């Protein structure tokens, strides 16, 4: 039993005990954050610092696990969020929880505060020089290149590899990789290799992204799901996917084409797939109309695209060498919102507009990513940590009210991932501007859009 061995050895830099006798406290989440930002580690819950096992009642275990998973996957708690699977073990006849926390390629913050491990302590990083050093360390890691020594070639789909060969030959009839055996192809594409620092050999993460079977993807990644919505002739159509990148690229381009045209759909999908941080649990979403495409997804500090993925997307004919794909080169971390829209003249913008929604203190110093001109100090405070500018957020609220006149404040909070106070403040402002009113009680009433707001929602 791993837990028993860890208890025998005792606490150290990579092992921490928490009794949790009266609940899961902040120090548990600070330790998780510190492990993510340093070298990873293991937390034993239900064990005190001396190694005495207190344990949990068996019936309480599912609720505790659910609470931990909800916290780590909540963008208001961890920035960026991530997925963790607590494991229960029995020690001395008592149930404890084992939390194995890996080192992350991202810098993670706990409610905006960044922690690292120094010896047996969790230390908050506040000085700019220390933050910069941490980000520099992290940005050296391209997760697409990470080696997984226990991923095997039979975890990949032969049909997807054959399809990749066909795409290579379609673009270039004399491509040297087009007629290789699968094992040789993976080696030549640098999708298998060795980590000269650790000596590990195996397939790289990118091999799983491109050619992984569905079960392989579910085991590898916290969340590969993409939700896509499009408006065609006034009808909302949806597409939900959780699959490899070859299938995902093809399906997304085909789905967005009726709304935006083939050329725009292809460029937008390429930008989206090349920029996304696939190890994040943050859900990706795309919305489309004939006038506008918007994607929201996790990005990684120091990353402006996945370079290996871009190389092969270009060779597969999915992306173009001439286009500037990936994120802008300014360093940031968090969630990115990417938008393409048609100008009023009817001409299409040739470049994609990218706006990062800052989720970490260091990134907050870089205002180049913010398109918002905030004058109200309260608005400025909320805008720095949210997904939309105040104006965009208010429009989202109006749209939700138009779609469901009985929508609750809680549902808006959940959808927009902001605080209740922010929603109420936005609603109060819009009421004063004459954009909406509330009819009936808080429980059984409904929202009514007025005048300009009603027309604006129709046009958007």
Image: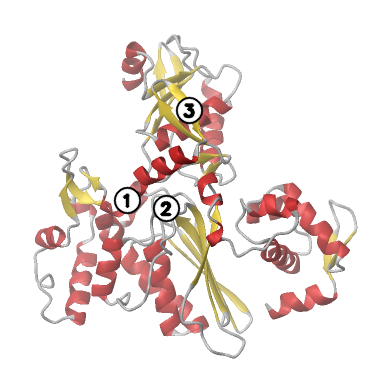
Image position of 117 (left or right of 348): left
Residue 232, numbered circle: none
Residue 143, numbered circle: 1
- Check contact, mark 1 vs mark 2: CB within 8 A: yes
Where disc 3 sits, the SS reads strand
Residue 63: where, in percent of width, then height?
A: 56, 31
Spatial CA span between label 3 and label 1: 26 Å
User: Upstream in the sequence, badge 2 or badge 3?
Assistant: 3
User: Upstream in the sequence, badge 3 or badge 1?
Assistant: 3
Q: Nearer the viewer, residue 403 or 318?
A: 318
What kind of colouring is applied to the model shown? secondary structure
Within 10 Å of disc 1 (Cα), the crowding (few <14, some 14-19, many 20+) is some
Quadrant where the C terminus lies?
bottom right
Residue 174 seen:
yes
User: Upstream in the sequence, badge 1 or badge 2?
Assistant: 1
Residue identifier under label 2: 300
- Check contact, mark 2 vs mark 3: CB within 8 A: no
Image position of 244 (left or right of 345): left
Residue 171: where, in percent of width, then height?
A: 21, 81
Q: Residue at x 27, y 73 (%)?
A: 314
Residue 59: where, in percent of width, then height?
A: 55, 24
Within 10 Å of disc 2 (Cα), the crowding (few <14, some 14-19, many 20+) is many
Residue identifier under label 3: 123
Image position of 409 (left or right of 12): right
Where disc 1 sits, the SS reads helix
**Circle nearer the viewer, 3 or 1:** 3
The quadrant where residue 196 appears = top left
Residue 444: where, in percent of width, then height?
A: 85, 55
* Residue furthest right as drawn: 440
Spatial CA span between label 2 and label 3: 22 Å
């Amino acid at each position: 039993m791993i837990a028993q061995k860890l208890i025998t050895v005792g606490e150290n830099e990579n092992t921490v005990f928490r009794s949790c006798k009266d609940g899961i406290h902040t120090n548990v989440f600070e330790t998780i954050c510190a492990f993510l930002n340093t070298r990873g580690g293991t937390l034993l819950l239900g064990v005190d610092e001396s190694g005495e096992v207190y344990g949990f009642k068996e019936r309480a275990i599912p609720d505790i696990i659910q609470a931990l998973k909800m916290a780590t996957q909540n963008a208001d708690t961890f920035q960026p969020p991530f997925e963790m699977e607590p494991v229960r073990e029995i020690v001395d006849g008592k149930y404890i929880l084992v939390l194995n926390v890996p080192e992350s390629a991202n810098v993670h913050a706990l409610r905006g505060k960044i922690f690292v491990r120094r010896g047996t302590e969790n230390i908050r990083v506040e000085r700019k020089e220390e933050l910069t050093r941490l980000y520099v360390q992290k940005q050296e890691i391209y997760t697409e290149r990470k080696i997984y020594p226990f991923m095997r070639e039979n975890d990949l789909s032969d049909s997807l590899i054959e399809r990749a060969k066909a795409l290579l030959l379609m673009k270039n009839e004399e491509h040297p990789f087009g007629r290789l055996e699968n094992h040789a192809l993976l080696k030549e594409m640098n999708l298998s290799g060795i980590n000269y620092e650790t000596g590990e050999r195996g397939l790289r993460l990118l091999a799983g992204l491109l050619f992984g079977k569905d079960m392989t993807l579910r085991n590898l990644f916290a969340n590969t799901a993409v939700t896509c919505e499009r408006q065609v002739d006034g009808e909302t159509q949806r597409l939900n996917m959780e699959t490899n990148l070859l299938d995902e690229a093809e399906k997304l381009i085909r789905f967005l084409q009726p709304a935006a045209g083939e050329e725009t759909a292809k460029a937008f999908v390429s930008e989206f797939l090349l920029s996304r941080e696939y190890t994040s649990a943050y859900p990706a979403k795309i919305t489309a109309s004939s006038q506008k495409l918007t994607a929201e997804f996790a990005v990684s500090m120091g990353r402006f695209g996945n370079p290996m993925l871009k190389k092969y997307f270009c060779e597969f004919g999915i992306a173009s060498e001439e286009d500037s794909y990936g994120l802008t080169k300014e360093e940031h971390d968090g969630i990115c919102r990417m938008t393409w829209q048609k100008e009023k003249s009817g001409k299409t913008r040739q470049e994609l507009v990218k706006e990062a929604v800052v989720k970490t203190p260091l990134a907050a110093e870089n205002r180049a990513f913010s398109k918002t001109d905030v004058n109200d100090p309260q608005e400025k405070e909320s805008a720095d940590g949210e997904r939309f500018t105040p104006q965009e957020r208010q429009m989202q609220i109006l749209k939700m009210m138009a779609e469901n006149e009985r929508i609750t404040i809680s549902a808006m909070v959940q959808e927009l991932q902001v605080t209740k106070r922010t929603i109420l403040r936005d609603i109060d402002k819009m009421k004063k501007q004459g954009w909406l009113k509330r009819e009936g009680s808080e429980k059984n009433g409904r929202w009514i859009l007025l005048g300009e707001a009603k027309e604006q929602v129709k046009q958007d």
